Image (cartoon, helix red, strand yellow):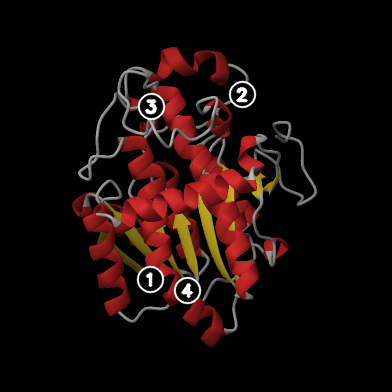
């Protein structure tokens, strides 16, 4: 991870904001989906992309909140192109409906920002009876990406513009269970750990991007897939009571970012020309960063892909 405040090769640092890393960039003609765009860094990601001319589709669980956020952005950026669509990533049925509605809209899709997530929840099962953090943070995004890939491929082909898939992960991927992904114990409440399960879901975000990047390269498709750590940020992700006790020793090592700083890496990876053609990487502070050994395990990434495919196809 880059030292806080020190610029990396990109010229940006942890203190750079989303507006700063996209200064001078023109996203006119691009269309992006941002999941979880009604809170935290999702709002700032949507706002800055809209500021740069991108047509932003806010994929949110609560559309009333989403519409309020849209109105606030339009007050600042009257010419912004923003839509709000309902998406509950903890429900595979909701993911399928969102993707179907999006496809029916005939909108192109250049950028898919898999941003939404929950953190360190008590043991809970999703509507599909899958551990909630794995279901929401990884599985919902996995299915969403798979269904929308054809739209992204067509858009890249017709627009002659590179498509980009961005998975918002976390340095917490280093705190996953020792085996990485508990394929046989996804729903095991007796050995469940709030932080370890969160780390597992964030490790899954990285492995998903890695395997997707490999497959897209093999197909020769002009779409990249990358993952990133946005930084340690005080957002409503920390609302679950077990979070502080489980994370205090880790958070103490870092200086919290502001939300504009936290959204910077996402916007950088989504829009900046320095990232053109770069795929299968993990970014921190708007620079390529280092990840855990498990997060570079190609065999684990392939196993997770097959496991996720089986779970989403069986529902």
Q: Earlier in the sequence, mark 2 or mark 4?
A: 4
Which image quadrant is residue 195 in? top left
* Pick the front one: 183 or 203: 183
Above or below 117: residue 165: below
- The Cα atoms of the two marked residues, 2 and 4, are separated by 36 Å
Q: Which residue is mark 4?
A: 152
- Give residue 250's position: percent from left, percent from top: 56, 19
Element at label 4 = helix
Above or below 209: residue 132: above
- The Cα atoms of the two marked residues, 2 and 3, are separated by 19 Å
Q: Earlier in the sequence, mark 1 or mark 4?
A: 1
Mark closer to the observer (2, 3): 3
User: Residue 120, labelled with which disc?
Assistant: 3
User: Residue 81, labelled with which disc?
Assistant: 1
* Pick the front one: 117 or 62: 117
Question: Callout 3: few (<14), some (14-19), or many (20+) C-alpha neighbours within 10 Å?
Answer: many
Q: Earlier in the sequence, mark 2 or mark 3?
A: 3
- Give residue 89's position: percent from left, percent from top: 30, 50
Element at label 1 = loop
Above or below 4: residue 20: below
Q: Earlier in the sequence, mark 1 or mark 3?
A: 1
- The Cα atoms of the two marked residues, 1 and 3, are separated by 34 Å
**Residue appearing at x 65%, y 34% in the figure:** 292
- Give residue 127's position: percent from left, percent from top: 20, 43
């Amino acid at each position: 991870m880059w030292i806080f405040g020190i610029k990396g090769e990109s010229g940006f640092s942890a203190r750079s904001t989303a507006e700063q890393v996209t200064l001078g960039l023109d996203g006119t003609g691009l269309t992006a989906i941002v999941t979880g765009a009604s809170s935290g860094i999702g709002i700032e990601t949507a706002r800055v992309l809209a500021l740069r001319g991108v047509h932003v589709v806010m994929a949110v669980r609560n559309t009333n909140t989403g519409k309020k956020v849209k109105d606030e952005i339009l007050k600042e950026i009257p010419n912004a192109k923003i839509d709000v669509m309902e998406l509950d990533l903890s429900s595979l049925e909701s993911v399928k409906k969102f993707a179907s509605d999006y496809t029916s809209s005939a909108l192109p899709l250049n950028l898919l920002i898999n941003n939404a997530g929950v953190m360190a929840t008590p043991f809970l099962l999703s509507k599909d009876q899958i551990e909630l953090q794995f279901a929401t943070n990884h599985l919902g995004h996995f299915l969403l990406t798979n269904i929308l890939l054809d739209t992204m491929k067509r858009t890249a082909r017709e627009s002659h513009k590179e498509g980009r898939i961005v998975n918002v992960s976390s340095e917490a991927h280093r705190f996953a269970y020792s085996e990485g992904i508990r394929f046989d114990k996804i729903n095991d409440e007796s050995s469940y750990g709030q932080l370890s399960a969160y780390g597992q879901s964030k490790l899954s975000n990285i492995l998903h991007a890695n395997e997707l990047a490999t497959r897209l390269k093999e197909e020769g498709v002009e779409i990249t897939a990358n993952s990133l750590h946005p930084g340690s940020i005080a957002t409503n992700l920390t609302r679950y009571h077990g979070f502080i006790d489980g994370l205090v020793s880790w958070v103490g090592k870092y200086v919290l970012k502001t939300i504009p700083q936290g959204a910077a890496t996402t916007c950088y990876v989504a829009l900046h020309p320095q990232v053109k053609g770069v795929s299968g990487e993990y970014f921190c502070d708007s620079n390529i960063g280092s990840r855990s050994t498990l997060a570079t395990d190609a065999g684990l990434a392939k196993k997770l892909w097959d496991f996720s495919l089986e779970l989403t196809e069986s529902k």
